[in-house]
Image (cartoon, rainbow, N blue to C red):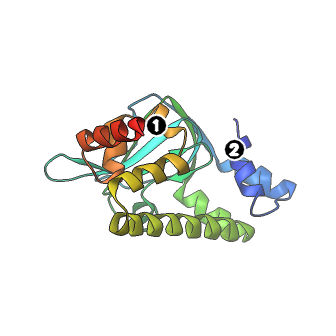
Amino acid sequence: MDTFQLFKSISSHITLDAEEETYLKSILLPMKIKQNEFIEHINEVTRYFINVNEGCLMTYYTDNEANDHVLQFATAGWWTGDLNSFTYGAPSIFSTKALTDSSVLLIPKVQMDELLTRYPKFEKYFRVIFQNSLITHQQRILQNFSMSAEGRYQYFLEKYPTLEQFVPQKHIASYLGITPEFLSKIRRKLMEK
């Protein structure tokens, strides 16, 4: 099981001893996901917290008109999934699927709770991860209120320079809150500059 990305992320926030590393490795469930396969389904309880080891996952909401609204892309080193469903056992309002062949490391809910109880150091790690996630979501909401679609797209390219290589344009447009056609116009305009 390849845990390099995960432990690299963890080591940037906390230092683990051998026992803590061994325990974490013992509860991780490695999984390979083919492109377009789902790891999390709408209306089902999220059973795992998902760490992306390789590839790219997309978490999104599907409205009553069958339109997909992208909440998050997750690449190597990122955590994803419906946190509300995972935490409270409520049916998920999101779906998560692989945009590329991917490998992930899963932590089941019971083992996550045990990890946090047994080794409080992980509380700090996940607190920092959740704080960073909240900050990112708040910034994205603010951008939607205050930036033009072109500005949001340029910021997206700066923040996620490799995503455009393998994420379909319709998903990027959804993430930005615009239509694929409007994104095409923005791209053409930027190429002309």
Give amino acid for label 1.
Glu
The percent position of residue 96, horizontal first and vertical second, equals 39, 45
Identify the image quadrant of residue 32.
top right
Q: Residue at x 25, y 44 (%)?
A: 182
> On the rendered image, what quadrant is the N terminus found in?
top right
Look at label 2 and name its amino acid.
Answer: Gln
Gap in Å between the C-alphas at discs 2 and 1?
A: 21 Å
Observer-nearest of 77 and 123: 77
Say which of 112 and 144 sits in front. 144
Which residue in the structure is indicated by mark 1? 164
Packing grade of label 1 (10 A; few <14, some 14-19, many >=20) is few
* Image point (46%, 41%), residue name: 57
Question: Are discs 2 and 1 less than 8 Å apart at CB?
Answer: no
Q: Residue 5: which disc?
A: 2
Where residue 132 appears, as percent x and y from the top left, is: 58, 66
Of pointers 2 and 1, the one earlier in the residue sequence: 2
Position of 154 relative to 84 (above/below): above
Q: Quadrant of residue 90?
A: bottom left
